[in-house]
Image (cartoon, grey):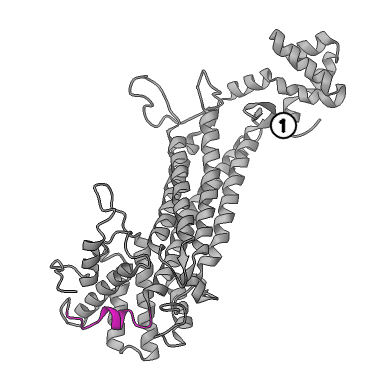
Amino acid sequence: MGAVEVPAGAYWGAQTQRALEHFAIGQGPGPALRFHPALVRAQARIKLGAARVNRVLGTLDEPTADAIAQAAGEVIDGRWADQFPLSVFISGSGTQFNMNVNEVVANRASELLGAEVGSRRVHPNDHVNRSQSTNDTFPTAMHLAALEVLADGLLPELHALHDALADKSAQYADVVKIGRTHLQDAVPMTLGQEIGAWAAQVRRGMAGLEGSLGGLAELPIGGTAVGTGLNAPPEFAPRIVAELSELTGRALREAPDKFEGLAAHETLAAASAALRTLAGGLMKIANDVRWLGSGPRSGLGELELPANEPGSSIMPGKVNPTQSEALTQVAVQVYGHDAAVAFAASQGNFQLNVYKPVLIYNVLAAADLLRDGCRSFRVHCLAGLRPNTERLAEHVRASLALVTALAPHIGYDTAAEIAHRAHAEGISLREAALALGAVSGEDFDRWVDPNRMARGEE
C-alpha cells in the first residue's frame, strides 16, 4: 500500500495513521465523535488478559507477554489517552480501533523491552493480537464498556435519584392536593403519593436496565473471525473470560453461541431500549415538575422551583424550570440514540454485524447523558423543590372533583348536578348541594373530607 508517515512521538502505527487519513469523519468543527474511554479500557483489558493467557498456553514468550500486559495496563490507567484519535465512523467491524490499540500496546511494549517505537520488537498482530480477531475482541469490548458505563456510571445515579424522590415522598406524605387526569381536576391525593409514583418510575427503569446486564456479561471472545475460533487454542476462550472476570470484578461468561455474538447485537439493543424506556419515565417526571411549578401566580404554582439562574434576558425576576427542560432534552436525545442503535443492531449480514462502532457509541453516549442529566436534576432541582402549601390547599378547596365522595351516598347523577350547578353559579360544592337539598350540611362535611379521600377512605 506504500509508505505512510506517522507523527514523531506517536505510539500508534501505520494502520491507525491510514485510518486517520481515510476516515476524517465527524472530527469537527464541533466535538469529535471519538471512541469512549470505557471502550479503550475494555479493549486494553482484552489485550492484557490475552497476553497472560497466551503466556500460560505457551503461544507467547514470557518477556513479550509481560511487556504487553504492562503496556496494556498503562492504557487502562489512562496514561496514553491521547494515542486513540480515531473517529467512530470507521470500518463497521472496528478493525482500525482494534489495530490502534494493538499498535499503541505493541510500541509501548517494545519500548519497555528496550527497543525503539516502531521497531516491531513486539508485533501488533503477531503478538498483541495473538489468538484474537477484531471480530471477537471488538464486540467483547462493547459488552465490557457497556457494563462499566451502565453498572458503574448510570445505575448509581439512578439509585441516588430514586432515594431522593423517596425521601421527598415521605416528607410530603400528609400534604393533600388535587390529582389530575386528562389535565383536569380529579380526586384528592397527597403530594407524597405523586412523588412516590415518580420514584416508582425510576425504580422500574432501573429494573429494566439491570435486567439487560445479564446478556452483556456473555462474551464472544474466542470466536475469532467468524465464530469458529480459528487460530485460537481451544483453551483460550474460557481462560481469557476468567482473566477478564478478574480484571473487571464481574461475573463474566462465554457467549453460548459465538457465531451469534459476532453477527448480532440484540443484547446491546435491549440495553438501549431500557435506556429509552428510562428516558421516557424521566421525561414524564420532569414535565410534571415544570407543570406543577408553572406560574408561579398565573399557572398551577403548586411547587416552588429553585432559582438557580435568571430566567429571562428581558423579564426581571423570572425563574424558569431549566433543570426540567435540560432533562427533557436529554430524554429526546436518548430516543435519538436508541433509534440509531435499533437500526444498527438490525443490520447484521451473515457472520458479522458491521455497524458495531456507531452502535456502541450511541449506547454509551445515551448512558452518559442520562447519568449527567439525573445528577443535575437531583442536585439543582429536586434538592430545593418544596410545595406551595397555600396554593395546594386553595386548589383542593376549589375543586369540583370533591363531589366524587358524594356519589356512593346520593348517586352519580345527583352528584353531577351538584358539580354543574356549583360551576355554573360560581359557588362552592357545599352551597350547591344544600341549595339542591341533596344532603345536609353535616353529611356533606362528613363525606367530603379531602384528607380521608386522599387515603382512599369513604
**5 left or right, relative to 366:** left
Q: Quadrant of the C terminus?
A: top right
Q: Position of residue 404 (x, y in %)?
A: 77, 25
Residue stretch in magenta: 119-132
Q: Quadrant of the N terminus?
A: bottom left
Q: Quadrant of residue 148?
A: bottom left
Figure check: 222 above or below 293? below
**407 drawn magenta:** no
Q: Position of residue 166 (x, y in %)?
A: 59, 43
**124 drawn magenta:** yes
Q: Position of residue 343 (x, y in %)?
A: 47, 56
Say which amino acid is labelled 1.
Ala
Decide which of 368, 304 is in the foreground and name it. 368
Identified at 74% across, 15% down, the residue is 420
- Crowdedness near tag 1: few (<14), some (14–19) or many (≥20) residues, C-alpha within 10 Å: many
Q: Quadrant of residue 18?
A: bottom left
Figure check: 416 above or below 427? below
Q: Quadrant of residue 188?
A: top right
Identified at 32% across, 59% down, the residue is 89
